[in-house]
Image: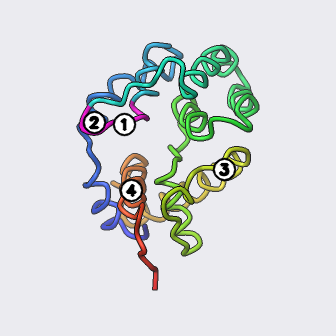
């Protein structure tokens, strides 16, 4: 993702209506700790086919992780909250804990698709299928590397076009990663 044109191309493929209906109306309240809004943006992170998010099972691992997140929410909203969240989820729920970090602290969203793009654009290696999964344990270090790269890439792109936003880059990386999920694409 080296040019503003690439960002525009890939971000234009993103289903913005899904965000407009499920993320945008909830993110501001979620960032203040509103539990209902936090649940709705967590469900947004769990897309189904079509428009509505896929329902999460009440007894499933994601729900258990969410309840654990809610139990620690007051600590996460206090000074040092980022470190507390990272410590509580040091070895579990890598994608959702990183997503909740995004919600509360504004860090980039990082998941299997953005990891696939990150790995390709930094190493030239395309991770297909589950090889791009964000691993348990070590996920915070991987997220930290991604965050540094993301902001450096954003700065590079904004030097060419100041209208490139964080969200545009995020959507472009997500769509690129999704499009290359099963790809044999090569940089060469």
In percent of the image, x 73 and y 38: which residue is there? 91
Place of residue 58 in the rendered image (x, y in percent of width and height, measured from the top left): 49, 17
Label 2: how many residues lie within 10 Å, few (<14), some (14-19) or many (20+)? some
Q: Magenta span covers which residues?
A: 44-51
Rendered position, 147 above or below 32: below
Q: Disc 3 marks which residue?
A: 144
Label 3, label 2: how far apart the Cα atoms are: 27 Å
Q: Quadrant of the N terminus?
A: bottom left
Tell whether position 46 is magenta: yes
Q: Disc 1 marks which residue?
A: 47
Place of residue 77 in the rendered image (x, y in percent of width and height, measured from the top left): 63, 19
Label 2, label 4: how far apart the Cα atoms are: 16 Å
Front residue of 137/175: it is 137
Place of residue 35 in the rendered image (x, y in percent of width and height, measured from the top left): 50, 13
Q: Secondary structure at mark 1?
A: loop
Q: Quadrant of residue 24?
A: top left
Dominant SS of magenta comes to loop
Q: Secondary structure at mark 4?
A: helix
State which mark lies toward you, 2 or 4.
Answer: 4
State which mark lies toward you, 3 or 2.
Answer: 2
Tally of numbered tags = 4
Find residue 184 and name its label.
none
Find residue 178 and name its label.
4
């Amino acid at each position: 993702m080296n040019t503003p044109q690439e960002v525009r191309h890939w971000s234009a493929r993103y289903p913005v209506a899904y965000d407009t209906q499920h993320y945008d109306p909830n993110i501001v309240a979620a960032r203040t700790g509103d539990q209902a809004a936090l649940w709705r943006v967590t469900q947004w992170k769990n897309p189904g086919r079509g428009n509505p998010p896929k329902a999460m099972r009440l007894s499933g691992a994601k729900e258990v992780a969410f309840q654990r997140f809610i139990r620690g929410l007051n600590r996460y909203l206090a000074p040092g909250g980022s470190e507390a969240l990272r410590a509580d989820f040091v070895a579990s729920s890598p994608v959702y804990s990183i997503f909740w970090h995004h919600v509360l602290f504004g860090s980039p969203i990082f998941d299997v698709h953005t990891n696939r793009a990150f790995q390709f654009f930094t190493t030239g290696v395309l991770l297909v299928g589950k090889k791009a999964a964000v691993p348990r344990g070590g996920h915070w270090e991987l997220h930290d590397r991604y965050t540094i790269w993301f902001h450096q890439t954003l700065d590079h792109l904004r030097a060419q076009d100041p209208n490139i936003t964080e969200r545009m880059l995020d959507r472009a990386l997500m769509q690129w990663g999704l499009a290359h999920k099963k790809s044999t694409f090569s940089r060469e």
